[in-house]
């Protein structure tokens, strides 16, 4: 069984709608179990730091993690950033190394500077040494017969970028094309993870912690050569 975790935040529910469609697409792929987890303000402690042990446990057990947050003021929702900063803990041990990673964001404008949020998520994935998966669909919306319901209307590759109209309810927006793009993105993440996991048994992840990296660096080049990771 391949495990895909979707972890997201939302202020008003539109990003949840996107997350649910990613979940729908991923769940439809045979042999894939999908868990949807929400980052909420109640998980922030008195010290201003995010923590939720159950979520971190589920993420540790996942083969793939899809990260999603709305775009607020031209970058990622601040609440979600607090969650990412807590992932300094698994970063230390490189515990998410070689998991599949993917990201999505939603905002009310067609562009809305969403790319910044996707870049934040992808850079985070790189720091965790995850294997980043992009959208996988060619762009819509760029030819004379284009419609609002085109798949990948925003023409985004780094991660899924959807639009929800500011005064529309989460049940009605994002539109049908973006919802279908989200489902296709979910299926792509599930399929890529299944494909990756087949090889993972033969070639398991080889995390090297920050502490071990420092130890080897201090010991010198010959110490590094003793390992094949
Ligand atoms: C504080 C705030 C800042 C926002 N900044 C942007 C922005 O920079 N670009 C944009 O296109 N939309 C922006 N929006 C609109 C939201 O991205 C949009 O309403 C989105 O659907 C919110 O998703 P949610 O319902 O999951 O919270 C902003 C909304 C809020 C409340």
Image (spheres, rainbow, N blue to C red):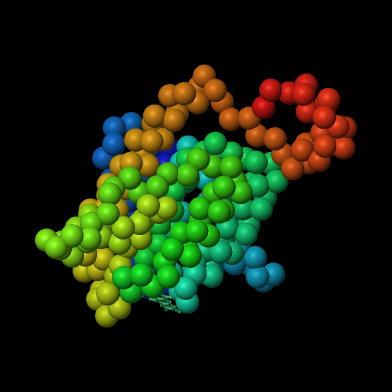
Nearest to the observer: residue 12 or residue 197: 197
Quadrant of the image where one finds ligand 1: bottom left
Q: Position of residue 11 (x, y in %)?
A: 42, 72
Q: Is residue 40 above or below residue 60?
A: below
Q: Say whether residue 179 is left or right of residue 83.
A: left
In terms of image quadrants, where is residue 207? top right
Tally the numbered discs: 0
Q: Residue at x 77, y 38 (%)?
A: 213
Horizontally, residue 203 falls left or right of residue 2, namely right
Residue 86 in percent (x, y) is at 63, 57
* Placement of 149 over or under 227, stated as above or below: below
Please determine whether, in this image, residue 135 is positioned above or below residue 145: above
Depth check, front residue: 207 or 49: 207
Residue 40 in view, yes or no: no
Identify the residue shown where x is 58% and y is 42%: 129
Residue at position x 21%, y 65% from top? 175
Left or right of 122? Residue 143 is: left
Visible residue check, residue 167: yes
**Which residue reaches farthest left?**
145
Q: Residue furthest front?
A: 144
Residue at image position (64%, 46%) is 90
Quadrant location of the N terminus? top left
Residue 96 place in picture, x, y as percent:
58, 41
Q: List the single residue furthest toward the top.
A: 202
Where's the C terminus, which quadrant? top right
Classify 15 as above or below 108. above
Q: x, y (%) of residue 85? A: 62, 59
């Amino acid at each position: 069984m391949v495990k895909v975790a979707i972890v997201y935040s939302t202020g008003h529910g539109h990003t949840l709608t996107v997350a649910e469609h990613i979940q729908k697409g991923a769940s439809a792929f045979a042999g894939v179990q999908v868990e949807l987890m929400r980052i909420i303000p109640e998980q922030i402690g008195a010290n201003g730091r995010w923590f939720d042990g159950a979520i971190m446990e589920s993420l540790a057990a996942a083969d793939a993690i899809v990260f999603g947050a709305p775009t607020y003021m031209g970058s990622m929702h601040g609440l979600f950033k607090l969650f990412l900063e807590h992932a300094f803990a698994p970063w230390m041990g490189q515990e998410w190394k070689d998991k599949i990673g993917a990201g999505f964001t939603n905002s009310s404008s067609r562009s809305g500077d969403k790319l910044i949020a996707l870049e934040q998520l992808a850079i985070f994935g790189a720091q965790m040494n995850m294997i980043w998966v992009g959208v996988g669909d060619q762009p819509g919306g760029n030819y004379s017969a284009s419609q609002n319901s085109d798949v990948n209307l925003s023409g985004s590759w780094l991660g899924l970028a959807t639009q929800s109209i500011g005064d529309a309810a989460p049940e009605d927006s994002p539109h049908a094309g973006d919802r279908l793009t989200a489902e296709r993105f979910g299926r792509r993440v599930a399929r890529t993870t299944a494909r990756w996991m087949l090889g993972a048994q033969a070639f398991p992840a080889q995390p090297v912690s920050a502490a071990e990296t420092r130890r080897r660096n201090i010991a010198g080049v010959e110490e590094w050569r003793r390992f094949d990771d």
